[in-house]
Image: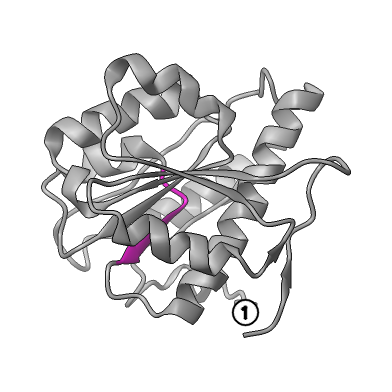
Amino acid sequence: MTKNTVVMAGPDARPRVLVVEPEPELADRIRAAAAAFEPVPEVVARPRLRSAELASVGGYQVLVVGPSLLDRAGFHKLATLARKTPSTAVVLVVDGRPEATLRQIVQVAAVDALPVAISDDELAMALERVVGLGRLRSGNSIAGTSAAPSRGRVITVASPTEGCGKTFVAANTALFLARTGARVVLVDLDLQFGEVSTALRARAD
């Protein structure tokens, strides 16, 4: 594996990663993957995350949550955490489908979801990206550039039925808003058959 470099905000800054999972194997794998980074992140392991400890999570750039904690109670706690410490990048390590609704999963605001059986190389690449993202979030928060961000409005067009016009409505809504001068991001969450680029006659990068 090649040596990875994670650029931090300050000369002495060291990324901090909190791993929450009763079994120590997950934290051990993350420590091994992080050992290739410069500077080497500090990886702290906890078997669980108590409600009284949520405030302390803000001191970590990355929070990795193991599969044994991804039940409904765990997702509720993580949603609370996402509101209190938005600068921390949350990663879910999943073993099959989590025991939660789609709404609960979205409210966690996780930046990545990794399978338990992920390879060491893929884990290192994912961790490098997430640590960098966590550094940017915490750095902006410290600098005050995003301590009070202006919030955009999210409009979701969804239906369990195919061919009912979701892409048509979403694309035309986005175009209308863009023509009013608003800054618009249009995201197609149909990862298998998404056709937003076709609807807009735009070539994807």
Residue 114 % position (x, y): 36, 64
Residue 168 left/right relative to 25:
right
Residue under the point 50% across and 60% down: 31
Task: Name the chief secondary structure element in magenta.
Answer: strand
Quarter of the picture holding the C terminus = bottom right
Residue 160 % position (x, y): 14, 57
Q: Is residue 102 magenta?
A: no
Residue under the point 37% across and 20% down: 53
Residue 41 left/right relative to 74:
right
Residue under the point 65% across and 70% down: 36
Tell me where residue 4 sits by quadrant: bottom right
Q: Which residue is mark 1?
A: 203
Three-letter amino acid code at disc 1?
Arg
Q: Secondary structure at mark 1?
A: loop
Tell me where residue 72 sits by quadrant: top left
Which stretch did the figure color magenta?
Answer: 110-115
Residue at the extreme right of the image, as rendered: 11
Residue 196 appears anywhere in the view: yes
- Tell me if residue 12 comes above or below residue 126 in the rendering: above
Foreground residue among 146 and 35: 35
Residue 19 % position (x, y): 40, 46
| Scheme by which the image is coloured | one colour
Residue 121 % position (x, y): 50, 80
